[in-house]
Image (cartoon, rainbow, N blue to C red):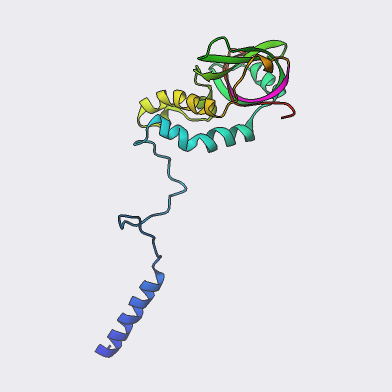
Amino acid sequence: MSLKQWGAAFIGCTTLLLTACTVVDLDENGKPILPADPNAKASFDNLTPQQIAQQTWQERVLDAAHKHALDATALTTLMTTPNEKPHSVFVRLSSQIERVDASSEREQKVVMTFNGKPLEIQMGPVVRGNAIRDATGFKFEDFTNQVQFAQLSRAYNREAIKALPKIDPSWAGKPATVLMAVTINAGQTEDAVALELKQEGQ
């Protein structure tokens, strides 16, 4: 190959390489912004539990609850199904509010009837239990920093109460629909916490 031919081939290869390149946007520091790997496992290593809760609240809690919430019949079936460990689920229940417990400013609750029994639903500001976190499907092994997993419940519980309405005794006796997370343990409901609560007709 002559020098002229070699030069032409080199230019052709260079052109081919350049046209095959993908233009990558740069961030404010001039570093390339690479698209997220859709198969990559979410990393929470450098996030606080509150940051994890805020970043995942819409998708892992609200969207999942609206899409997968059990109704009263499905919840009844689940409660009568033997299960060795406590497990948490999202539930949508429409019923009359029998009672409002607003005597404590820190631990307010509404009481609705489910299967002929009172079901206490936490409205905050203090919320107990791991129902929301566990209903999302997050597991202990999803987190390298296990302190995050332990504290994520409290962070989710704090997120939950932000959008809940203020309740008072006037809610008693009125029909309402609640979207909630609840833990099932030995066929009983525990630590139910509201994600949304709306009076019917509003």
Q: Is residue 2 visible?
A: no
- Horizontally, residue 84 falls left or right of residue 119, namely left
Q: Residue at x 46, y 24 (%)?
A: 153
Locate residue 63: give its quadrant: top right
Q: Which residues are magenta?
A: 174-182
Q: Nearer the viewer, residue 201 or 196?
A: 201
Q: Quadrant of the C terminus?
A: top right
Q: Is residue 26 above or below residue 178?
A: below
- Horizontally, residue 12 falls left or right of residue 175, namely left
| Magenta span contains residue 121 | no
Q: Is residue 31 above or below residue 143?
A: below
| Magenta span contains residue 177 | yes
Q: Residue 171 at what x, y percent from top left?
A: 68, 18
Q: Nearer the viewer, residue 4 or 30?
A: 30
Q: Residue 15 at what x, y percent from top left?
A: 36, 77
Locate residue 30: give its quadrant: bottom left
